[in-house]
Amino acid sequence: MFNMIDAHIHWDAYSPGQRTGILDSLDTHGIRAMIAVSMNLKSSRETLDLSVMDGRVKAAAGFHPEQELPSEEEIEELFIFLDQHAESLVAVGEVGLPYYRMQDDADFELKPYEELLERFIVKAKSLDKPIILHCIYEHAGIACDLLERHSVQKAHFHWFKGEEAILERVLSNGYKISVTPDLMYEEEIQKIVRKAPLDAIMVETDGPWPFEGPFQGKMTHPRMMGQTIKCIASIKKLDESEVAERIFTQSKRFYGLSI
Ligand SMILES: [Zn+2]
């Protein structure tokens, strides 16, 4: 059994029954912690409450970019929430840019999302917390511009997707990426794992997001990361336990977890 940390899960999006079932089975599967990201202010509050109920749930607060922008009032409340609960939160996230939302809309205005992302970057830096980014393809480049502008080091590009040049830029800045169970069946992700050094890779589920291939029709459970780790080991031709241990250690360190 591997020691594992789910570096990105939407814990508040599971039903109470599902959460109980998952929590009861975490030890069996070696899941030592889960980085529970939030969608908005309400979700940030719920996620923080859930983290208080079980120490293995580590809360992050933020605003998911693939939705209508929040009101200025909500943004301000969210920033106050971040300040007030900084001690209990492990990171700022999920934040980023709305790649999927703008795909079918030629008139989409990205600028306000970039401005909001920059405010979150500044906040993460002032709180000295890692930032969890939903920034894929060309948006990863925009995020790098903003992170570099504010000299932010601790950035995690969750479920990273993008061309080689963008991946290289992310890696050369020392940022982390994470991969989901879709590594089992997505060639695009396998290519990224081949290119990225093991020290830059974390594993996650983005649960309850559902997966295909061997996971078709199954509720997304952090134990699925066991297969992701085996897949990384086979791509990198390394020992599975060694890969698991290194990913565990660097995830723990990145998020400053004392587990
Ligand atoms: Zn997510």
Image (cartoon, rainbow, N blue to C red):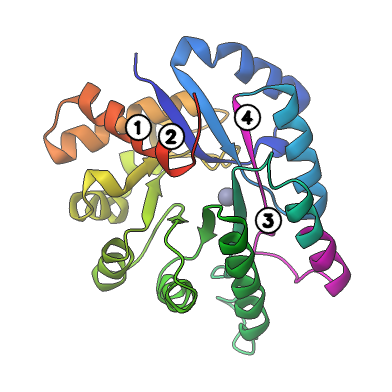
Task: Identify the residue at image location x=17%, y=40%.
Answer: 235
Q: Mark number for residue 62? A: 3
Mark nearer the N terminus (4 vs 3): 4
Helix, strand or loop at mark 4 = strand
Residue 171 appears left or right of 157: left
Whether 178 is drawn above or below 95: the answer is above
Q: Mark number for residue 249? A: 1
User: Observer-nearest residue: 21 or 78?
Assistant: 78
Q: CA distance from mark 3 to mark 2?
A: 20 Å
Give the magenta range: 56-78
Task: Identify the residue at image location x=19%, y=50%.
Answer: 194
Q: Within 10 angstroms of label 2, few (less than 14), some, or many (20 or more) residues? A: some
Residues tagged 2 and 1 counted as in contact (Cβ below 8 A): yes
Q: CA distance from mark 4 to mark 1?
A: 17 Å
> Is residue 75 located in the magenta-colored stretch of the structure?
yes
Where is residue 248? Give x, y as percent.
36, 30
Can residue 221 be seen? no
Mark nearer the N terminus (2 vs 4): 4
